[in-house]
Image (spheres, rainbow, N blue to C red):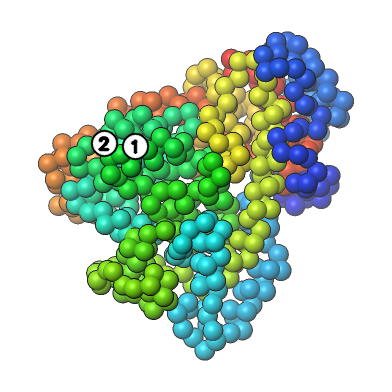
Amino acid sequence: MTIQNVNNNAEPTSPERLPRGQHSELRRPEGRNLSRRKFLATGCMALSGAGVGLMAQGLSGKEDPKPTEMPDIDPGYVGPQFFDKREQDALLEVLESGSPFRFWGPGEPVKVLRFEQDFAKYMGTRFALGVTSGTAALDCAVAGLGIGPGDEVIVPAYTWWSDYTCVIHAGALPVFADIDRTFNLDPADFQRKITARTKAVIAVHLLGGPCDMDPIMETARKRGLAVLEDCAQCVGGSYRGKKLGSIGDVGIYSFQINKMITSGEGGALVSNDPVIYERAARFHNMGTIHQLFLDRVGTSRVQTFAGENFRMSEFTGAVLGAQLTKLDSMLAHLRQNAEAIYSGIEMLAGIRLRQRPDPDGDIGYGVYFETKDKASRDRCIRELRKRKVPASTLTGSVLLPTEESVINKRARHRDWPSFNSPQGKEIKYGPDNCRGTLEIFDRFVQVRIGAKYTQRINDYIIDAIRQVYDLLT
Ligand SMILES: Cc1ncc(COP(=O)(O)O)c(C=O)c1O
Protein backbone atom coordinates (compact mmCIF):
# COMPACT_ATOMS: atom_id res chain seq x y z
CA MET A 1 0.00 0.00 0.00
CA THR A 2 1.31 3.43 -0.81
CA ILE A 3 1.68 6.22 1.67
CA GLN A 4 -1.31 7.97 0.10
CA ASN A 5 -3.50 5.01 1.06
CA VAL A 6 -2.17 5.14 4.57
CA ASN A 7 -3.14 8.74 4.77
CA ASN A 8 -6.58 8.21 3.33
CA ASN A 9 -7.76 5.51 5.66
CA ALA A 10 -6.99 7.21 8.93
CA GLU A 11 -7.09 10.56 10.60
CA PRO A 12 -5.28 13.24 8.58
CA THR A 13 -1.98 14.38 10.04
CA SER A 14 -2.08 18.12 10.08
CA PRO A 15 0.74 20.06 11.68
CA GLU A 16 -1.82 22.25 13.38
CA ARG A 17 -3.53 19.38 15.20
CA LEU A 18 -0.73 18.58 17.62
CA PRO A 19 1.55 21.08 19.26
CA ARG A 20 5.18 20.17 18.39
CA GLY A 21 6.84 17.65 20.61
CA GLN A 22 3.56 16.52 22.17
CA HIS A 23 2.11 13.11 21.83
CA SER A 24 -1.66 12.98 22.10
CA GLU A 25 -1.99 9.94 24.34
CA LEU A 26 1.41 9.82 25.90
CA ARG A 27 2.38 13.02 27.58
CA ARG A 28 5.29 12.35 29.92
CA PRO A 29 3.49 11.13 33.05
CA GLU A 30 6.24 12.08 35.46
CA GLY A 31 9.83 13.19 35.33
CA ARG A 32 12.50 11.92 32.99
CA ASN A 33 13.68 9.42 35.63
CA LEU A 34 10.49 7.48 35.86
CA SER A 35 11.30 3.87 36.71
CA ARG A 36 11.22 1.59 33.73
CA ARG A 37 8.57 -0.77 35.10
CA LYS A 38 6.31 2.04 36.17
CA PHE A 39 6.73 3.80 32.85
CA LEU A 40 5.99 0.73 30.79
CA ALA A 41 2.87 0.14 32.80
CA THR A 42 1.64 3.74 32.49
CA GLY A 43 2.61 4.19 28.86
CA CYS A 44 1.26 0.89 27.67
CA MET A 45 -2.06 1.41 29.38
CA ALA A 46 -2.33 4.71 27.61
CA LEU A 47 -1.48 3.07 24.32
CA SER A 48 -3.98 0.26 24.60
CA GLY A 49 -6.51 2.94 25.51
CA ALA A 50 -5.65 4.56 22.18
CA GLY A 51 -6.62 1.36 20.44
CA VAL A 52 -3.17 0.49 19.19
CA GLY A 53 -3.85 -3.07 20.16
CA LEU A 54 -0.34 -4.39 20.73
CA MET A 55 0.61 -5.56 24.17
CA ALA A 56 4.05 -4.47 25.29
CA GLN A 57 5.42 -7.85 26.20
CA GLY A 58 9.13 -7.26 25.80
CA LEU A 59 11.22 -9.75 23.90
CA SER A 60 10.60 -12.38 26.51
CA GLY A 61 6.88 -12.24 25.69
CA LYS A 62 5.56 -15.33 23.94
CA GLU A 63 3.21 -13.88 21.37
CA ASP A 64 4.51 -12.52 18.10
CA PRO A 65 2.80 -9.39 16.77
CA LYS A 66 -0.39 -10.20 14.92
CA PRO A 67 -0.14 -9.12 11.27
CA THR A 68 -3.71 -7.85 11.20
CA GLU A 69 -2.91 -5.28 13.88
CA MET A 70 -0.09 -3.71 11.95
CA PRO A 71 -0.77 -0.50 10.09
CA ASP A 72 1.01 -0.13 6.75
CA ILE A 73 4.11 1.89 7.42
CA ASP A 74 5.87 3.26 4.37
CA PRO A 75 7.77 6.51 4.89
CA GLY A 76 7.95 6.93 1.10
CA TYR A 77 9.74 9.82 -0.61
CA VAL A 78 8.79 13.18 0.84
CA GLY A 79 8.97 15.44 -2.23
CA PRO A 80 6.85 13.30 -4.59
CA GLN A 81 4.18 12.87 -1.86
CA PHE A 82 3.57 16.60 -2.24
CA PHE A 83 3.55 16.78 -6.07
CA ASP A 84 0.35 18.43 -7.30
CA LYS A 85 -0.95 20.92 -9.84
CA ARG A 86 1.73 23.44 -8.93
CA GLU A 87 4.51 21.25 -10.36
CA GLN A 88 2.30 20.24 -13.30
CA ASP A 89 1.48 23.84 -14.25
CA ALA A 90 5.09 24.95 -13.90
CA LEU A 91 6.29 22.13 -16.16
CA LEU A 92 3.58 22.88 -18.73
CA GLU A 93 4.63 26.51 -18.79
CA VAL A 94 8.16 25.45 -19.76
CA LEU A 95 6.85 23.09 -22.46
CA GLU A 96 4.52 25.68 -23.88
CA SER A 97 7.17 28.41 -23.86
CA GLY A 98 9.55 26.19 -25.87
CA SER A 99 12.39 27.39 -23.60
CA PRO A 100 13.84 24.55 -21.56
CA PHE A 101 17.33 26.16 -21.45
CA ARG A 102 17.94 28.62 -18.63
CA PHE A 103 19.85 31.33 -20.51
CA TRP A 104 17.82 31.83 -23.69
CA GLY A 105 15.03 30.48 -25.92
CA PRO A 106 11.94 31.64 -27.79
CA GLY A 107 10.09 32.39 -24.55
CA GLU A 108 11.41 34.04 -21.43
CA PRO A 109 13.21 31.41 -19.40
CA VAL A 110 12.83 32.44 -15.76
CA LYS A 111 12.27 29.21 -13.81
CA VAL A 112 15.88 28.61 -12.66
CA LEU A 113 16.44 32.34 -12.20
CA ARG A 114 13.39 32.63 -9.93
CA PHE A 115 14.19 29.44 -8.09
CA GLU A 116 17.65 30.81 -7.30
CA GLN A 117 16.17 34.07 -6.02
CA ASP A 118 13.58 32.30 -3.88
CA PHE A 119 16.06 29.73 -2.60
CA ALA A 120 18.57 32.40 -1.52
CA LYS A 121 15.75 34.24 0.27
CA TYR A 122 14.56 31.06 2.00
CA MET A 123 18.08 30.17 3.15
CA GLY A 124 18.89 33.75 4.19
CA THR A 125 21.90 34.17 1.91
CA ARG A 126 22.86 36.77 -0.69
CA PHE A 127 23.36 34.31 -3.54
CA ALA A 128 22.12 30.93 -4.77
CA LEU A 129 23.13 28.89 -7.81
CA GLY A 130 21.07 26.05 -9.30
CA VAL A 131 23.10 23.10 -10.63
CA THR A 132 22.54 19.53 -11.85
CA SER A 133 23.15 17.62 -8.61
CA GLY A 134 24.45 17.83 -5.06
CA THR A 135 27.71 16.29 -6.29
CA ALA A 136 28.04 19.06 -8.89
CA ALA A 137 27.27 21.64 -6.20
CA LEU A 138 30.11 20.25 -4.07
CA ASP A 139 32.53 20.46 -7.03
CA CYS A 140 31.43 24.08 -7.57
CA ALA A 141 31.83 24.87 -3.87
CA VAL A 142 35.36 23.45 -3.78
CA ALA A 143 36.20 25.44 -6.92
CA GLY A 144 34.56 28.46 -5.29
CA LEU A 145 36.86 28.13 -2.28
CA GLY A 146 39.91 27.86 -4.53
CA ILE A 147 40.97 24.50 -3.09
CA GLY A 148 43.67 22.65 -5.04
CA PRO A 149 46.78 20.45 -4.97
CA GLY A 150 48.71 20.62 -1.70
CA ASP A 151 45.60 21.53 0.32
CA GLU A 152 44.03 19.26 2.89
CA VAL A 153 40.29 19.18 3.49
CA ILE A 154 38.77 17.61 6.61
CA VAL A 155 35.86 15.32 5.79
CA PRO A 156 33.72 13.23 8.19
CA ALA A 157 34.55 9.51 8.04
CA TYR A 158 30.86 8.69 7.63
CA THR A 159 29.25 10.63 4.78
CA TRP A 160 28.32 10.34 1.11
CA TRP A 161 30.97 9.66 -1.56
CA SER A 162 30.68 13.13 -3.08
CA ASP A 163 32.24 14.80 0.00
CA TYR A 164 35.35 12.73 -0.70
CA THR A 165 35.31 12.89 -4.52
CA CYS A 166 34.96 16.69 -4.61
CA VAL A 167 38.28 16.97 -2.74
CA ILE A 168 39.96 14.44 -5.04
CA HIS A 169 38.61 16.17 -8.18
CA ALA A 170 40.33 19.36 -7.00
CA GLY A 171 43.63 17.46 -6.59
CA ALA A 172 43.54 18.09 -2.82
CA LEU A 173 43.88 15.54 -0.01
CA PRO A 174 40.91 14.34 2.09
CA VAL A 175 41.69 13.88 5.80
CA PHE A 176 39.06 12.00 7.78
CA ALA A 177 37.71 13.03 11.17
CA ASP A 178 35.35 10.94 13.31
CA ILE A 179 31.67 11.61 13.78
CA ASP A 180 30.15 11.77 17.27
CA ARG A 181 26.71 10.88 18.64
CA THR A 182 25.18 13.64 16.50
CA PHE A 183 26.26 11.40 13.52
CA ASN A 184 28.06 14.51 12.30
CA LEU A 185 31.59 15.83 12.53
CA ASP A 186 33.05 15.54 16.04
CA PRO A 187 34.28 19.11 16.75
CA ALA A 188 37.13 17.78 18.93
CA ASP A 189 38.39 15.36 16.28
CA PHE A 190 38.09 18.07 13.62
CA GLN A 191 40.41 20.21 15.74
CA ARG A 192 42.88 17.33 16.16
CA LYS A 193 43.09 16.75 12.38
CA ILE A 194 44.09 20.32 11.46
CA THR A 195 47.62 20.73 10.05
CA ALA A 196 49.46 23.64 8.46
CA ARG A 197 48.08 22.47 5.09
CA THR A 198 44.40 22.32 6.08
CA LYS A 199 42.37 24.69 3.94
CA ALA A 200 38.77 23.77 4.68
CA VAL A 201 36.37 21.51 6.52
CA ILE A 202 33.19 19.95 5.14
CA ALA A 203 30.50 20.04 7.83
CA VAL A 204 27.93 17.51 6.63
CA HIS A 205 24.48 17.68 8.24
CA LEU A 206 23.57 14.01 7.98
CA LEU A 207 20.28 12.19 8.38
CA GLY A 208 18.23 15.31 8.94
CA GLY A 209 20.17 16.63 11.94
CA PRO A 210 22.41 19.70 12.13
CA CYS A 211 26.09 19.55 13.08
CA ASP A 212 27.04 21.33 16.27
CA MET A 213 28.09 24.41 14.30
CA ASP A 214 29.22 26.74 17.11
CA PRO A 215 32.40 24.85 18.07
CA ILE A 216 33.08 23.99 14.41
CA MET A 217 32.83 27.65 13.37
CA GLU A 218 34.88 28.80 16.33
CA THR A 219 37.76 26.45 15.49
CA ALA A 220 37.55 27.22 11.77
CA ARG A 221 37.62 30.98 12.30
CA LYS A 222 40.48 30.74 14.81
CA ARG A 223 42.54 28.62 12.42
CA GLY A 224 41.62 30.52 9.23
CA LEU A 225 39.79 27.59 7.60
CA ALA A 226 36.89 27.75 5.16
CA VAL A 227 33.67 25.95 6.12
CA LEU A 228 31.64 24.15 3.45
CA GLU A 229 28.24 23.02 4.75
CA ASP A 230 26.81 19.97 2.99
CA CYS A 231 23.05 20.15 3.62
CA ALA A 232 22.06 17.49 1.05
CA GLN A 233 20.40 15.35 3.73
CA CYS A 234 19.03 18.26 5.72
CA VAL A 235 17.38 20.69 3.27
CA GLY A 236 15.43 23.26 5.30
CA GLY A 237 17.09 22.32 8.59
CA SER A 238 18.50 24.99 10.88
CA TYR A 239 20.89 25.55 13.78
CA ARG A 240 20.10 28.09 16.49
CA GLY A 241 17.71 29.96 14.21
CA LYS A 242 19.92 30.03 11.11
CA LYS A 243 19.16 27.95 8.06
CA LEU A 244 21.77 25.29 7.35
CA GLY A 245 24.03 26.38 4.51
CA SER A 246 24.00 30.01 5.61
CA ILE A 247 26.38 29.59 8.57
CA GLY A 248 29.66 28.63 6.87
CA ASP A 249 31.30 30.20 3.81
CA VAL A 250 29.35 28.15 1.30
CA GLY A 251 26.49 25.64 1.52
CA ILE A 252 25.26 22.96 -0.86
CA TYR A 253 22.01 20.98 -1.28
CA SER A 254 20.79 17.99 -3.27
CA PHE A 255 17.34 17.53 -4.82
CA GLN A 256 17.70 13.86 -5.72
CA ILE A 257 14.62 11.79 -4.89
CA ASN A 258 15.63 10.84 -1.32
CA LYS A 259 15.98 14.48 -0.31
CA MET A 260 13.36 16.86 1.10
CA ILE A 261 12.37 18.69 -2.08
CA THR A 262 13.05 16.90 -5.33
CA SER A 263 13.21 17.15 -9.07
CA GLY A 264 14.64 13.63 -9.39
CA GLU A 265 18.10 15.13 -9.77
CA GLY A 266 19.32 18.63 -9.03
CA GLY A 267 21.43 20.65 -6.64
CA ALA A 268 22.12 24.16 -5.38
CA LEU A 269 24.84 26.20 -3.75
CA VAL A 270 24.47 29.26 -1.54
CA SER A 271 26.95 31.85 -0.29
CA ASN A 272 27.18 35.41 0.97
CA ASP A 273 30.63 35.84 -0.56
CA PRO A 274 30.73 37.38 -4.07
CA VAL A 275 34.12 35.83 -4.93
CA ILE A 276 33.13 32.31 -3.87
CA TYR A 277 29.84 32.75 -5.72
CA GLU A 278 31.44 34.07 -8.91
CA ARG A 279 34.05 31.28 -8.94
CA ALA A 280 31.28 28.69 -8.41
CA ALA A 281 29.04 30.25 -11.07
CA ARG A 282 31.96 30.25 -13.50
CA PHE A 283 32.91 26.67 -12.70
CA HIS A 284 29.34 25.51 -13.40
CA ASN A 285 29.44 27.14 -16.86
CA MET A 286 32.85 26.14 -18.32
CA GLY A 287 34.60 28.93 -16.43
CA THR A 288 32.71 31.69 -18.22
CA ILE A 289 30.26 34.05 -16.57
CA HIS A 290 26.76 35.05 -17.65
CA GLN A 291 25.65 38.63 -17.15
CA LEU A 292 22.90 37.63 -14.70
CA PHE A 293 25.53 36.45 -12.20
CA LEU A 294 27.52 39.65 -12.66
CA ASP A 295 24.33 41.62 -12.00
CA ARG A 296 24.09 39.74 -8.68
CA VAL A 297 27.68 40.22 -7.56
CA GLY A 298 27.95 43.80 -8.94
CA THR A 299 31.32 43.50 -10.61
CA SER A 300 33.59 40.67 -11.81
CA ARG A 301 36.47 39.82 -9.48
CA VAL A 302 37.55 36.54 -11.09
CA GLN A 303 39.16 35.72 -14.45
CA THR A 304 37.94 32.97 -16.76
CA PHE A 305 39.30 29.50 -15.91
CA ALA A 306 38.55 25.91 -17.00
CA GLY A 307 35.22 24.71 -15.64
CA GLU A 308 32.41 22.22 -16.27
CA ASN A 309 28.82 22.29 -17.47
CA PHE A 310 26.56 21.81 -14.45
CA ARG A 311 23.73 24.13 -15.58
CA MET A 312 20.22 23.43 -14.29
CA SER A 313 17.46 23.03 -16.89
CA GLU A 314 14.22 25.01 -16.83
CA PHE A 315 12.25 21.79 -16.22
CA THR A 316 14.23 21.18 -13.05
CA GLY A 317 13.87 24.82 -12.01
CA ALA A 318 10.10 24.63 -12.59
CA VAL A 319 9.61 21.60 -10.33
CA LEU A 320 11.93 22.95 -7.64
CA GLY A 321 10.22 26.33 -7.62
CA ALA A 322 6.91 24.60 -6.90
CA GLN A 323 8.45 22.23 -4.32
CA LEU A 324 10.10 25.10 -2.47
CA THR A 325 6.71 26.68 -1.75
CA LYS A 326 5.81 23.47 0.14
CA LEU A 327 9.05 22.92 2.02
CA ASP A 328 7.81 24.43 5.30
CA SER A 329 4.71 22.29 5.22
CA MET A 330 6.75 19.13 4.49
CA LEU A 331 9.06 20.00 7.39
CA ALA A 332 6.12 20.57 9.74
CA HIS A 333 4.66 17.13 8.97
CA LEU A 334 7.96 15.28 9.38
CA ARG A 335 8.91 17.15 12.53
CA GLN A 336 5.57 16.60 14.15
CA ASN A 337 5.78 12.85 13.58
CA ALA A 338 9.42 12.57 14.67
CA GLU A 339 8.81 14.61 17.84
CA ALA A 340 5.70 12.55 18.67
CA ILE A 341 7.81 9.38 18.53
CA TYR A 342 10.76 10.91 20.38
CA SER A 343 8.47 12.11 23.16
CA GLY A 344 6.87 8.67 23.32
CA ILE A 345 10.21 6.96 24.01
CA GLU A 346 12.51 9.56 25.56
CA MET A 347 11.38 8.90 29.13
CA LEU A 348 12.26 5.22 29.00
CA ALA A 349 14.84 4.93 31.77
CA GLY A 350 18.34 4.54 30.39
CA ILE A 351 17.42 5.07 26.73
CA ARG A 352 20.18 6.75 24.75
CA LEU A 353 18.91 8.78 21.83
CA ARG A 354 20.82 10.52 19.05
CA GLN A 355 22.49 13.63 20.40
CA ARG A 356 20.76 16.63 18.83
CA PRO A 357 22.57 19.97 19.22
CA ASP A 358 19.41 21.80 18.18
CA PRO A 359 16.28 19.60 18.09
CA ASP A 360 14.22 22.48 16.64
CA GLY A 361 16.50 22.49 13.58
CA ASP A 362 16.15 18.74 12.95
CA ILE A 363 14.05 17.99 9.86
CA GLY A 364 12.61 14.76 11.32
CA TYR A 365 14.02 12.35 8.77
CA GLY A 366 14.28 9.62 11.37
CA VAL A 367 14.30 8.70 15.04
CA TYR A 368 17.53 7.20 16.37
CA PHE A 369 18.46 5.28 19.49
CA GLU A 370 21.46 3.38 20.69
CA THR A 371 21.73 -0.31 21.58
CA LYS A 372 24.29 -2.10 23.74
CA ASP A 373 26.34 -3.47 20.86
CA LYS A 374 26.24 -4.53 17.23
CA ALA A 375 24.52 -7.86 17.96
CA SER A 376 21.77 -6.08 19.94
CA ARG A 377 21.42 -3.52 17.15
CA ASP A 378 20.92 -6.26 14.55
CA ARG A 379 18.46 -8.12 16.74
CA CYS A 380 16.58 -4.91 17.50
CA ILE A 381 16.29 -4.16 13.77
CA ARG A 382 15.06 -7.69 13.07
CA GLU A 383 12.44 -7.46 15.82
CA LEU A 384 11.22 -4.07 14.65
CA ARG A 385 11.04 -5.24 11.04
CA LYS A 386 9.01 -8.26 12.12
CA ARG A 387 6.56 -5.66 13.37
CA LYS A 388 6.80 -3.88 9.98
CA VAL A 389 8.55 -0.85 11.48
CA PRO A 390 10.99 0.70 8.94
CA ALA A 391 14.09 0.10 11.06
CA SER A 392 17.65 -0.20 9.81
CA THR A 393 21.23 0.70 10.54
CA LEU A 394 22.18 4.30 9.72
CA THR A 395 21.62 4.72 5.98
CA GLY A 396 22.45 6.98 3.05
CA SER A 397 26.20 7.29 3.67
CA VAL A 398 29.40 5.30 3.44
CA LEU A 399 32.09 4.47 6.00
CA LEU A 400 34.58 6.00 3.60
CA PRO A 401 37.95 5.08 5.14
CA THR A 402 36.97 1.40 5.03
CA GLU A 403 36.19 1.39 1.30
CA GLU A 404 38.64 -0.52 -0.89
CA SER A 405 39.08 2.27 -3.47
CA VAL A 406 39.77 4.75 -0.66
CA ILE A 407 42.20 2.46 1.17
CA ASN A 408 44.07 2.00 -2.12
CA LYS A 409 43.97 5.76 -2.84
CA ARG A 410 42.70 5.20 -6.36
CA ALA A 411 42.12 8.37 -8.40
CA ARG A 412 41.36 8.63 -12.12
CA HIS A 413 45.08 8.66 -12.97
CA ARG A 414 48.00 7.18 -11.05
CA ASP A 415 49.84 10.51 -11.07
CA TRP A 416 46.81 12.40 -9.72
CA PRO A 417 48.07 15.18 -7.41
CA SER A 418 45.94 14.21 -4.38
CA PHE A 419 48.12 11.24 -3.51
CA ASN A 420 51.42 12.38 -5.01
CA SER A 421 52.30 15.13 -2.57
CA PRO A 422 54.57 14.02 0.32
CA GLN A 423 51.55 13.98 2.69
CA GLY A 424 49.39 12.24 0.05
CA LYS A 425 51.98 9.46 -0.24
CA GLU A 426 52.23 9.19 3.52
CA ILE A 427 48.54 9.19 4.46
CA LYS A 428 46.95 5.82 5.24
CA TYR A 429 43.21 5.18 5.11
CA GLY A 430 41.51 2.25 6.80
CA PRO A 431 39.35 1.33 9.79
CA ASP A 432 41.98 2.81 12.13
CA ASN A 433 41.07 6.23 10.67
CA CYS A 434 37.57 5.97 12.06
CA ARG A 435 37.34 3.81 15.19
CA GLY A 436 34.99 6.26 16.95
CA THR A 437 32.77 6.40 13.86
CA LEU A 438 32.56 2.61 13.56
CA GLU A 439 31.54 2.30 17.21
CA ILE A 440 28.69 4.74 16.72
CA PHE A 441 27.60 3.19 13.43
CA ASP A 442 27.55 -0.28 14.97
CA ARG A 443 25.25 0.63 17.86
CA PHE A 444 22.57 2.94 16.48
CA VAL A 445 19.18 1.99 15.07
CA GLN A 446 17.31 4.20 12.62
CA VAL A 447 13.53 4.30 12.33
CA ARG A 448 12.42 6.27 9.28
CA ILE A 449 9.72 8.90 9.64
CA GLY A 450 7.12 9.60 6.98
CA ALA A 451 5.58 12.99 6.37
CA LYS A 452 2.20 11.28 6.00
CA TYR A 453 2.30 9.10 9.09
CA THR A 454 -0.86 9.26 11.14
CA GLN A 455 -1.10 9.40 14.93
CA ARG A 456 -2.01 5.71 14.84
CA ILE A 457 1.26 4.90 13.05
CA ASN A 458 3.28 7.03 15.48
CA ASP A 459 1.63 5.25 18.41
CA TYR A 460 2.26 1.88 16.82
CA ILE A 461 5.98 2.66 16.33
CA ILE A 462 6.31 3.86 19.93
CA ASP A 463 4.73 0.66 21.14
CA ALA A 464 7.01 -1.48 18.95
CA ILE A 465 10.12 0.31 20.25
CA ARG A 466 8.95 -0.34 23.80
CA GLN A 467 8.68 -4.01 23.00
CA VAL A 468 12.35 -4.20 21.99
CA TYR A 469 13.40 -1.98 24.87
CA ASP A 470 15.31 -4.81 26.59
CA LEU A 471 17.87 -4.65 23.81
CA LEU A 472 18.56 -0.98 24.31
CA THR A 473 19.76 -0.83 27.88
C1 LIG B 1 25.52 14.12 2.26
C2 LIG B 1 25.39 14.11 0.77
N1 LIG B 1 26.13 14.97 0.05
C3 LIG B 1 26.04 15.02 -1.28
C4 LIG B 1 25.20 14.18 -1.98
C5 LIG B 1 25.19 14.23 -3.47
O1 LIG B 1 23.95 14.60 -3.99
P1 LIG B 1 23.51 14.11 -5.45
O2 LIG B 1 23.05 12.70 -5.34
O3 LIG B 1 22.41 15.06 -5.81
O4 LIG B 1 24.69 14.25 -6.35
C6 LIG B 1 24.40 13.27 -1.28
C7 LIG B 1 23.49 12.37 -1.99
O5 LIG B 1 22.95 11.43 -1.46
C8 LIG B 1 24.50 13.23 0.13
O6 LIG B 1 23.78 12.38 0.86
- Which residue position holds label 2? 194
Q: Quadrant of residue 65?
A: top right
Seen at 61% across and 39% down, the residue is 360
x, y percentage for residue 388?
69, 34
The residue type indicated by label 2 comes to Ile
Disc 1, SS: helix
Residue 305 screen position, x and y as percent: 24, 69
Q: Nearer the viewer, residue 245 or 165?
A: 245
Marks 2 & 1, CB-CB < 8 Å contact: yes
- Left-right relation of 169 to 337: left
Q: CA distance from mark 2 to mark 1?
A: 10 Å
Residue 300's spot in the image, x, y percent?
Answer: 31, 72
Q: Please tell me whether residue 134 is drawn above or below residue 157 in the rendered image.
A: below
Disc 2 crowd, CA 10 A, few/some/many (<14, 14-19, 20+) = many
- The location of residue 90, given as percent across then percent down, is 63, 73
**Which element carries disc 2, helix, strand or loop?**
loop
Task: Please tell me which of labels 2 and 1 falls first in the chain.
Answer: 2
Task: Count every numbered label the image shows and give the total.
Answer: 2
The residue positioned farthest toward the left in the image shown: 422
Q: Is mark 2 within 8 Å of ligand 1?
A: no
Look at label 1 and name its amino acid: Thr
**Residue at x 69%, y 32% (from the top left corner):** 341
Q: Is residue 46 above or below residue 407?
A: above
**Residue underneath mark 1:** 219
